[in-house]
Each structure stands twice: as structure tokens, then as C-alpha cells.
Image: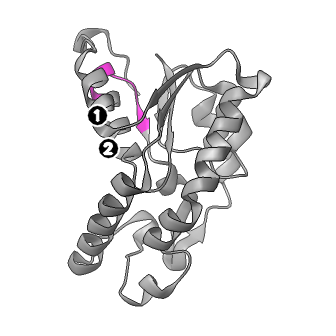
Amino acid sequence: MERILVVGVTGAGKSTLARALGGLLGVPYHEMDALYFDGPGWSVSTRLTEDVARLAGGPRWIIDSLGYPEVRDLLWERAGTVIWLDYPKRVVMPRVLRRSVRRTVTREVLFGGNRETWAGWLSREHPAWWAWSQHGARRREVARRVRDPRFAPLDVLRFAHPRDAAAWLSTLTPADPSEVPAP
């Protein structure tokens, strides 16, 4: 596994798994939201396509996203493995709610220097609302892509529960640090 997409709905744990997998395998991890949002007011990077194309053109990477529409096909065409965290709402919603409450209370700095706010909870763009409203659509989009003949060469690992992903992760052999190329 050298070019890996970790996909799933908001709150499934994509970043957490991607970060752990990257550390274990010695593969550079890139957070899609950090590439997408580049400034105050949740502004979108004007360099998104170029930045993602540069990263995806590399031999080894992990990205934690289905991919924003601008770069979705690019990522799926260049990936070798897709890890699909296909978790039900009853698993995802408590996770995303805990994360958003923590981020709001602690005023954690996120992508582009932004923060989640209490007022933001009223927006349909807030992660909690997004996770609830987009859950079915995201699952259908990933399922459609997995069946798409263009992406047939991809190795797809689909996990229905976090314990399944954790069990799989525990079976992997850590990379030898002396053999890991510099990013």
C-alpha cells in the first residue's frame, strides 16, 4: 500500500486512521481539509487542484477524504488502495458531536486558522449537521465509485465498524524506519 485514500462520512475517523496508518507504514499523510481551507472565514485554497495533483503524483501518500469535487477523480485515478470506513449513523454521530463540542469549547485552531463556534452550530455547513444530512449520500457515492469500472484496479478495504478497522490495523507490520524515504 503506497497511494491510499481513507474515505467515509464526516466523523468516521478518517484522519485518525490515516495518521496512524501513515505512521505505521512510513507513508506521508496529508489532511484534505488542511489542503482545502487556507485562510480565515473558511476560505478555499485557490491552489487546491495544483497542490493535490502534486501530492497525488507522488509515489507514496495517504489522504483522508473521498475528495472534494474539484479533485475527487484525480485522487481516485491515482490511488492504489481505498480504505472505506462505512460506519452507521449510530457510530458516527456521537463521534462528530464529541469532536465538535471539544473543538468549540477549547477554541481549537483548525484549518486555515479557523475555529468551530457556537454560532456555527446553526449552519448547515457545521460538521454535525453535515454528518447527519450527508451520511446516506456519501455512502452511496463511495459505493458507486467502488463499483465504477474506472476504479476496478483499486484494492478496496471496507470496514463496517471501528473495531474491524482497528483489528485490521493491528495486523500490519510497521515499516523499518531505515527504509522509509524522506517526504
144 and 127: which is toward the camera:
144
Q: Give how far across and how far down residue 46 sits, in percent.
A: 68, 61
In the image, is 16 to the left or to the right of 130?
A: left
Q: Give how far across and how far down residue 28 sits, in percent.
A: 40, 30
Q: Residue at x 31, y 59 (%)?
A: 95
Q: Which residue is drawn at 63% across and 35% down?
A: 54
95 and 21: which is toward the camera:
95
Q: Give how far across and how far down residue 94 sits, in percent.
A: 30, 62
Asked if residue 105 is positioned above or below residue 67 in the image, the reply reads below
Q: Residue 82's image quarter?
A: top right
Q: Give the range drawn in magenta.
A: 23-29
**Mark 2 packing: few (<14 Cα in 10 Å), some, or many (20+)?**
few
The mark found on residue 16 in the picture is 2
Residue furthest out toward the right: 149
Q: Residue 17's image quarter?
A: top left
- Amino acid at circle 1: Ala
92 and 111: which is toward the camera:
92
Let me know if residue 25 is in the magenta part: yes
**Mark 1 packing: few (<14 Cα in 10 Å), some, or many (20+)?**
some
Circle 1 residue: 20
Judging from the image, what secondary structure is the residue with disc 2 in? helix
Q: Which residue is drawn at 53% across and 80% down?
A: 41
The mark found on residue 165 in the picture is none
Asked if residue 119 is positioned above or below residue 82 in the image, the reply reads below
